[in-house]
Image (cartoon, rainbow, N blue to C red):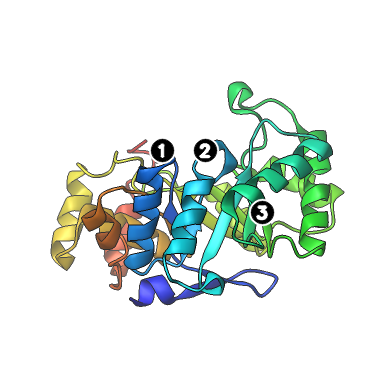
Amino acid sequence: MPALTDTFTMSNGLHIPRIGFGTWQIPSGAEAYDATKVALDAGYRHIDTALAYGNEASVGKAVRDSGVPRDEVFITTKLPAEIKTAAGARSAFEESSRNLDLGVVDLYLIHAPWPWSAIGTDHREGNVEVWKVFEELYDAGKTRSIGVSNFEVPDLENLLANTDVVPHANQIRWFIGNTQDATTAFDRDHDILTEGYSPLATGGLLENAEIRDIAAKYDKSVAQVAIRYLLEKDVLPLPKSTTPSRIAQNAEVDFVLSAEDIAALDALEGTTD
């Protein structure tokens, strides 16, 4: 399926499949293992996890058991948001590597610029300290690319001013009506790939009548239009599901939205959350 085999090229030349399978809120064990295996069987070649999700070991086992060669699967994981020290970052990376048991990580992200229990607090120094460890891991070939998640423009500016490697990717909450325009523009201007998690607004878009009307024109689902919208904007979508039929359907987005329909979806800005 072209949408699953097409890639974006990051600033360091690394190819990343244009759609990723997100595993947030999928419990470890059979659920995470089965969902990841179904995604791989459906043709996904990009799996996104995190130490904080608690499911890295299940994801790694599913990849190993899938029969898909390791070099054909792009694996992202993340440093827990509350870790803002060099020692903590080194230790967490080793833990993630052991959990996954897949060799080199493809993309390693700082999960957020602040701990989830203290959103918006100032951790600029800690983020720089952690990023320097990320640069070490990257230089040592332990991860093929490095990036951030939930970073806004001031967070990115701080990193760029105080470190050497510009993040290769920034994974942010991005969907119709919540397109984070300032951050997305900053990413584009600095050749940082924007990845969009919760492209369906954690299900919040599925009952939207305007999107449903547009979807009907293409004989597609609301979810498929929502995911396609990200691709039209050069944002990498990370849809998540545990339902096999939906996992497959979420990748069936080899259609093109008209300029008129994209404009109509743009106009929904701020109407959804």
- Choose between 267 and 8: the one closer to the eye: 8
Residue 224 locus on image (x, y percent)? 27, 59
Quadrant in the picture for residue 90: top right
Mark count: 3
Disc 3, SS: strand
Find out whether the residues at labels 2 and 3 contact each other: C-beta distance under 8 Å.
Answer: no
Q: Which residue has dot 2 on it?
A: 54
Decide which of tag 2 and tag 3 comes sooner along the chain: 2
Residue 116's place in the image compared with 223, above or below, is above
5 displayed left or right of 181: left
Quadrant in the picture for residue 91: top right
Residue 186's place in the image compared with 130, above or below, is below
Q: Which residue has dot 1 on it?
A: 27
Mark 3 Cα within 10 Å, few/some/many (few <14, many 20+)?
many
Q: Quadrant of the N terminus?
A: bottom left
Q: Which residue has dot 3 on it?
A: 147
Decide which of tag 1 and tag 2 comes sooner along the chain: 1
